[in-house]
Image (cartoon, grey):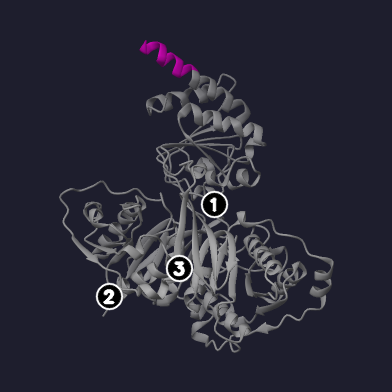
Amino acid sequence: MNLFVLLKQVPGTSNVKMDEKTGTMVRTDHENVINPLDENALEAALELKRSIDGSKITVLSMGPPPASRALREAIAMGADEAHLLCHRGFAGSDTLATARALALAIEHVAGRKLGPSDLVLCGERATDGETGQVGPMISAMLDIAVATYVRGIRVKEGHAVVERVVEEGFERVRIPLPALVTVVKDMNEPGFPTLSGKLAARTAPIPLLTPDDLGLTQDIVGLSGSPTRVVQVFRPKFTRDTVLRQQDSGGAAVGLLVDLLIEKEVI
Amino acid sequence: MDYSGVLVVGEQRGESVHSVTYELLARGRTLADKLGVSLACVVIGHRLEASGREIVERGADVVYLVDDPSLEWFIPRRYSAELAALIGQIRPEIVLAAATTAGRTLMPHVAAKLGTGLTADCTGLDIDDKERLLLQTRPAIGGNVMATIKTPSARPQMATVRPKSARPLPRDLGRHGDIVVRTAVCDNAQFAGERLLEFVRDTSQDVSVQDAEIVVAGGKGLKNRDSFKLVEELAGLLGAAVGATRDAVDLGWIGYPHQIGLSGKTVSPRLYVAIGLSGAIQHLAGMQTSETIVAINKDKDAQIFKVADYGIVGDLFDVAPELIDKIKHAKNERLSGAR
């Protein structure tokens, strides 16, 4: 089985700066980590690989050169091969442009359209952008089945049965392969790198893919290929007339709050 | 043909329209009125006949019910095929859907098919007067800031909207609108291998923090799982649901279904009591539409006081027990008074 895992490198902290001109994130190479939910996707792929003979895991990411570190980490954990979409032309991509590039990259490294022994896995969303849109977009572009919010997966002949977490409970859904699955945190506990994995990661080649390699022209990649534009980034202002009281030893503030709750017929 | 009009993508659950549809209609109505265009609503599912009338009463001018046994359950590719076909036919300039597990799956799929932009989890929507463009505002960068996004040239302009970030319009029984029932256009055989095998309602997920009239929420300031019980006790007294910040959930004090904020649920209860939480924008994005907000925090500069109607500056370990006592007392008094 050919398993493709999509990884995003995200800032390990929430102190991220914005480029005021483009409205995009300023990505520095320090303190970046693998998007935690993508680690669950990788772990799910590793579990499938262990249970299905002859499986292979290919990891893909898009980002600046330091993102190759995340890919090496994935190899250390047991992935077989990694590719990085890395070129200035990709910069500023919104979810649509990102999905387009990744969809083409999956077919590029597979050397063909996906077939019934292929499965693409990714995290349900990234902790930085938090859109959760790239996975379903890729499935549409590759014209393959999709299941989101997946917490369990069993692969059978030519299809998979997945468990999706939804608002009121969960669904068991049958999807034909090839398919794309986005996973939630409850899926599994990500493992650790192995010694042999670490050795493999040190020397593994990580080929870089450019827009040219994928046949992407400038108008459909990066910022210029992105239909959405960030026009303003701001800290929200709030307009409430707050009554602020310091609680004293007499408990006056609490007393007034209780009066307010009585007035609002809460108690 | 140019794109014109606003289309709201409604949702059904077991043959009845989900209330998030009416929230979206309230949003859509405002946008349509600003643009001077009509508001349409589509619901995809099965046995929808009875649903159209209330959708009109809640603000729609035209209702499309895409009704077919094959659409009874949400299968992304089927729903996407139906929605893309409808959009291709009526060509709305704006499409809104709910940021639910279904909407957050369906809408990116449709946007990718149409090659247009999509903004996730919006909490604010407006129209740019000059360019007539949809302004889509959402928390960004882990909720530290808000970003306003537009889709300058691709059409339609599409957004998913956080449930409970707007209130439905009251029913207007006198409203008129057209109800169009459509059958499925997508080829049943094409997606035959894709189906729902089982749906299991999970009552342990059913904390209904989203539907609660009163929410008492706690954050990192509670310091540990044991003190978090103060929040639970107060919620019990007020008949409220328990909410929590991402920190409190990550620390394991309470389960994810209680998480309020950008990566959790959005709520807009009548009363929101925030205890020991500083008010990260991530969290504020999930509760700032609450009718009345009460906050208890020892830091007088805490962000939460900027959205609160009533704030108590004080150590929650003094304030919360005192509040619990006084509420008990007030309740007792009322009970004895009633006797």
Point 83% across, 70% down: residue: A196
Q: Which mark is residue B89?
A: 2
* Region in magenta: B329-339
Quick one: quadrant of the N terminus of chain B?
bottom left
**Observer-nearest residue: A127 or A195?**
A195
Is B334 a magenta residue? yes
The secondary structure type at the circle numbered 2 is helix
Q: Which mark is residue B282?
A: 1
Task: Please state the horizontal and vertical placement of residue B224, each as a whole percent of the image.
Answer: 67, 36
Q: Main secondary structure of the magenta part?
A: helix
**Observer-nearest residue: B15 or B289?**
B15
Q: Which mark is residue B194?
A: 3
**Observer-nearest residue: A263 or A108?**
A108
Does the residue at mark 2 contact the one at mark 1 (Cβ under 8 Å)? no
Point 23% across, 47% down: residue: B171
The secondary structure type at the circle numbered 3 is loop
Within 10 Å of disc 1 (Cα), the crowding (few <14, some 14-19, many 20+) is: many
Quick one: quadrant of the C terminus of chain B?
top left
Task: Confirm whether residue A131 shows in the render.
Answer: no
CA distance separating discs 2 and 1: 38 Å
